[in-house]
Image: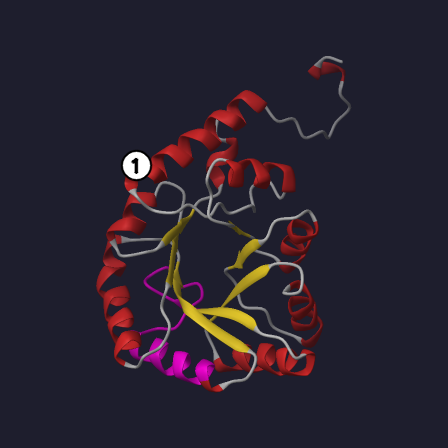
Amino acid sequence: MHIYDLDTPALVVDLDVLERNISAMARRCAEIGIPLRPHTKTHKNPEIAKMQMAAGACGIACQKLGDAEVMAKAGLRDILIPYNIVGIHKVRRLAALTQLATVTVALDSVDTALGISQQAKLDGGSVRVIVELDTGAKRCGVQSPQAALELGRRVMDLPGLALQGIMTYPSMLEAKPFIAETVELFQRASLPCSMISGGGTGHEAISKEIGCTETRSGSYAYEG
């Protein structure tokens, strides 16, 4: 079959371009010295995610709970959901998902933390969480290092939650003081902070510069 024989709409992927992009980004992050966690929102395809993992990725990111469920059922085992999960139906699905894979979810409020904690307690399980920082994007995230510390302390007091660290998006040089102060406050308070997740395709070196332990890049997969 020729490409022009396909009916529309049809998704067509140039495998040569895809493989080249996956390899190039993996190589770039290795040279920079920062682990890559590809964001799968561009392709939402478990087979492509597995190609990214085979190239050296430390895990994947999924923006939606449904995407993460698809990836986990396909065998992907380290998944970050960098978005607040709210509502009884979704937290039930999140708790169930943790039985299939190592799942970490971002939160920026006590309300979000309480919802996840209550479900995890009911199920007798534990959910890994990170505190999201608003370092300038004005999308989601706590507004200051002190607010991050306060939320981190609340998380530590709630059953069924396992604090891992912090995250931001996108990685910006201007965020470095915010992140550094947050990390210092966490360390002084003996709060876990082994995970510092940054993001943004093209921002890999910035993630490294501002002290992140991993970077999330996604749109590079299909770039022609």
| Identity of the residue drawn at 35% across and 35% down | 28
**Magenta-drawn stretch contains 153:** yes
Residue 77 lies left or right of residue 196; in this view the side is right
User: Which residue occupies the foreground of this view, 29 or 6?
Assistant: 29
| Identity of the residue drawn at 66% across and 64% down | 99
What x and y, as percent, mark residue 220? 46, 36
**Magenta-drawn stretch contains 26:** no
Q: Which quadrant of the figure has residue 78?
A: bottom right
Instruction: Sort mark 1 into few (<14), some (14-19) or many (20+) by Cα contacts within 10 Å.
Output: few
* For residue 27, above or below residue 127: above
Colouring style: secondary structure
| Identity of the residue drawn at 65% across and 70% down | 95
Q: Which quadrant of the figure has residue 43?
A: top right
What x and y, as percent, mark residue 168? 38, 60
Region in magenta: 131-156
What x and y, as percent, mark residue 17? 51, 23
User: Which residue occupies the foreground of this view, 84 or 103?
Assistant: 103
What x and y, as percent, mark residue 163? 45, 73
Q: Quadrant of the N terminus?
A: top right
**SS of the residue under disc 1:** helix
* For residue 65, above or below residue 20: below
Q: Which residue does the numbered mark 1 point to in the structure image?
A: 31
Specify the amino acid type for callout 1: Glu
| Identity of the residue drawn at 64% across and 49% down | 71
Q: Which quadrant of the figure has residue 190?
A: bottom left
Residue 182 lies left or right of residue 41; in this view the side is left
* For residue 92, above or below residue 63: below
| Residue with the most extreme top position | 2
| Residue with the most extreme left position | 177
Residue 126 lies left or right of residue 210; in this view the side is right
- Labels in figure, total: 1
